[in-house]
Image (tube, helix red, strand yellow):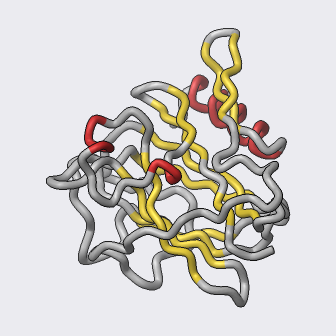
């Protein structure tokens, strides 16, 4: 059963997202999470691609809540927009997410912590999951595939700011850092994916 605090955080996140900016509430203060990458440049820079890695699985289930019985870890609510380089929202874009669990393990036999959704008419997408754990050689990250209808697939990874291993991970790209708010119990993250289309 979600706590009142979690529901308030979720409401703040989704209402702010619809206005093109996350916000999380702490006490009486609203802390903005700026869209990343920011639109405003003409045209905006496209989100860079990154390695798929060895753990991608085709045909993930369509769902936005990736938590299941037996999956522990701090809650992570992640979302954003899918945009063109001219900052127009993309409706109906496939957004496929997969990740390690809180212990740094990937499910290689099924679809735990894997799922896909489609961006809404305003380009919004979101998932509820847990914060991924660490494993040797990598910093904390999420995997993402995004595809605009009838266009090429973007495969990339998203990263958490302030992680000690960011500097030593050879795949890490600071352009793929998410905007993050919340706390150790409930983290809210945002990344606006800009596809390389006008």
- Between 14 and 195, the residue placed more toward the observer is 195
Dividing the picture into quarters, in which one does residue 157 lie? Answer: bottom left
Lateral position of residue 189 relative to residue 137, left or right = right
Residue drawn at (38%, 37%) of the image: 74
Q: Quadrant of the C terminus?
A: bottom right
- Residue 120: where, in percent of width, then height? 77, 64
- Between 120 and 37, the residue placed more toward the observer is 37
Dividing the picture into quarters, in which one does residue 113 lie? Answer: bottom left
- Between 155 and 42, the residue placed more toward the observer is 42
- Residue 30: where, in percent of width, then height? 70, 19
- Residue 23: where, in percent of width, then height? 69, 31
Residue drawn at (52%, 51%) of the image: 175
Residue drawn at (69%, 37%) of the image: 34
Q: Is residue 118 above or below residue 158?
A: below
Q: Is residue 61 above or below residue 113?
A: below
Q: Residue furthest front?
A: 42
- Residue 123: where, in percent of width, then height? 77, 62
Q: Is residue 193 above or below residue 182?
A: below
Dividing the picture into quarters, in which one does residue 165 lie? Answer: top left
Q: Is residue 3 above or below residue 136?
A: above
Q: Residue furthest left?
A: 136
């Amino acid at each position: 059963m979600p706590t009142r605090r979690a529901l308030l955080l979720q409401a703040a996140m989704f209402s702010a997202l619809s206005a093109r900016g996350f916000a999380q509430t702490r006490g009486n203060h609203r802390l903005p999470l700026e869209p990343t990458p920011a639109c405003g440049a003409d045209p905006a820079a496209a989100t860079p691609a990154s390695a798929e890695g060895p753990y991608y699985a085709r045909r993930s289930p369509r769902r936005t809540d990736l938590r299941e019985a037996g999956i522990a870890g701090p809650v992570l609510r992640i979302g954003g927009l899918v945009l063109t380089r001219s900052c127009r929202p993309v409706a109906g874009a496939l957004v496929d997410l997969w990740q390690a669990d809180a212990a740094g393990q990937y499910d290689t036999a099924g679809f735990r912590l894997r799922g896909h959704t489609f961006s809404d008419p305003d380009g919004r997408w979101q998932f509820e999951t847990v914060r991924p754990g660490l494993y040797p050689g990598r910093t904390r990250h999420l995997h993402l595939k995004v595809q605009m209808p009838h266009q090429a697939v973007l495969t990339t990874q998203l990263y958490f700011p302030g992680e000690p291993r960011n500097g030593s991970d050879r795949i890490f790209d600071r352009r793929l850092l998410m905007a993050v708010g919340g706390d150790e119990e409930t983290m809210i993250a945002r990344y606006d994916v800009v596809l390389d289309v006008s």
